[in-house]
Image: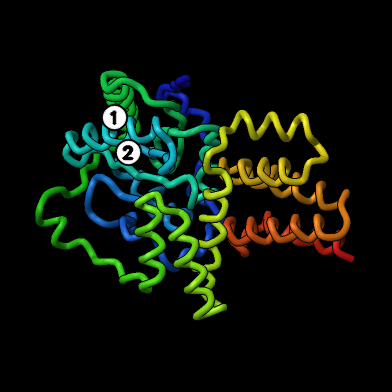
Amino acid sequence: MTNTHLPSSLGGAVDLSALAARRDQAAAAPAERPAGAPGVIVDIGDADFGQIVELSSSVPVIIDIWAEWCGPCKQLSPVLERLIEGYGGRLVLAKVDADRNPQLVQAFNAQSIPTVAAVIGGRPAPLFTGALPEEQVKDVLEQVLAFAEQQGITGRIPVGGDAAEQEPQPEPLPPLHQEAYDAIDAGDLDSAIAAFEKAIAQNPRDSDAIAGLAQVRLLARLRGHSADDIRAAAATQPHDVEAQLLAADLDLSGGHVEDAFLRLLDLMAALTGDEKQNVRLRLLDHFEIVGLDDPRVHAARKRLTTLLY
């Protein structure tokens, strides 16, 4: 089901220039590039979204929120890439992996994926959800450009071989991290888990591996389950710990951070013994995924402390 909003909705949009509480991501997936690098298609994360907001003051930025497991995303993303490359630098496509960037998912209120939005002059607007036909996608992009022109935003970024040659090269990832990301790209979550676990065994303070392991474990737990089935089980079995844990995982994967934390904290308050410990461990995993500096994590930690003592 699609839900299209034309760029005129920008009139009531919220300015994202002051977007705060970005997660510190020292390492990124191999395919990611700095948002300020030349090129019309870039991968962005929670930590570098400020660069996209700044870029949007000179050229409209289209946001594509996707996930590796999302079938419609695999239909839509190539269409977006092909169309935006055809505009010769008048548009930029910023791709957001929903599984790795929960703050951006929440910032754009992405209730489902794929979700496509625009940022023009630091201000966001929803465009559509779901995989639209190419002609409809092109029509939306044309309307974005028309609206941007009304706002005086008519820039163009460099494209072509010269820009590619000037692009800074990212620092290589540690070997086990690279092995894990390669496994994720191949859909082999078990091997990714094993690689991250080995990295942590070698360096128990490897915060990137700890966060990566928590993310991949969440994906592995959701594998093979539909969102509808998870929601139905949680609703009909409110006292089933595993059903509630899986529903919290689903909440977090969709960017509903507060919902995930509240579900687990309320569940923990009603439990004792080993079951309570299992919920605590799941919360700690969720804290790693969201980012330990996130204010929502700080608030949840305070309540968790009261429930433990």
Front residue of this view, candidates 224 and 113: 224
Would you say residue 260 is visible in this rendering? Answer: yes
Tell me if label 2 and label 1 are in contact, CB under 8 Å: yes
Residue at left 31%, top 56%?
31
Q: Amino acid at mark 2?
A: Pro
Residue 60 is marked as 2
Placement of 264 over or under 298, stated as above or below: above
Q: Position of residue 194 (x, y in %)?
A: 48, 65
Residue 145 is marked as 1
Placement of 14 over or under 193, stated as above or below: above
Q: Position of residue 100 (x, y in %)?
A: 48, 52
Q: Position of residue 34 (x, y in %)?
A: 33, 59
Q: Amino acid at mark 1?
A: Leu
Q: What is the number of callouts on the image?
A: 2
Placement of 60 over or under 12, stated as above or below: below
Residue at left 35%, top 59%?
182
Residue at left 45%, top 20%?
2
Judging from the image, what secondary structure is the residue with disc 2 in? loop
Front residue of this view, candidates 276 and 47: 276
Few, some or many C-alpha atoms within 10 Å of disc 1 (few <14, some 14-19, many ≥20)? many
Judging from the image, what secondary structure is the residue with disc 1 in? helix
Q: Is residue 235 shown left or right of residue 214?
A: right
- Residue 162 placement: quadrant: bottom left
Front residue of this view, candidates 25 and 49: 25
Give the farthest residue toward the bottom: 202
Q: Position of residue 302 (x, y in %)?
A: 79, 61
Residue at left 33%, top 23%?
140
What whole-number distance in Å separates the C-alpha atoms at marks 2 and 1? 7 Å
Q: Is residue 104 shown left or right of residue 248?
A: left
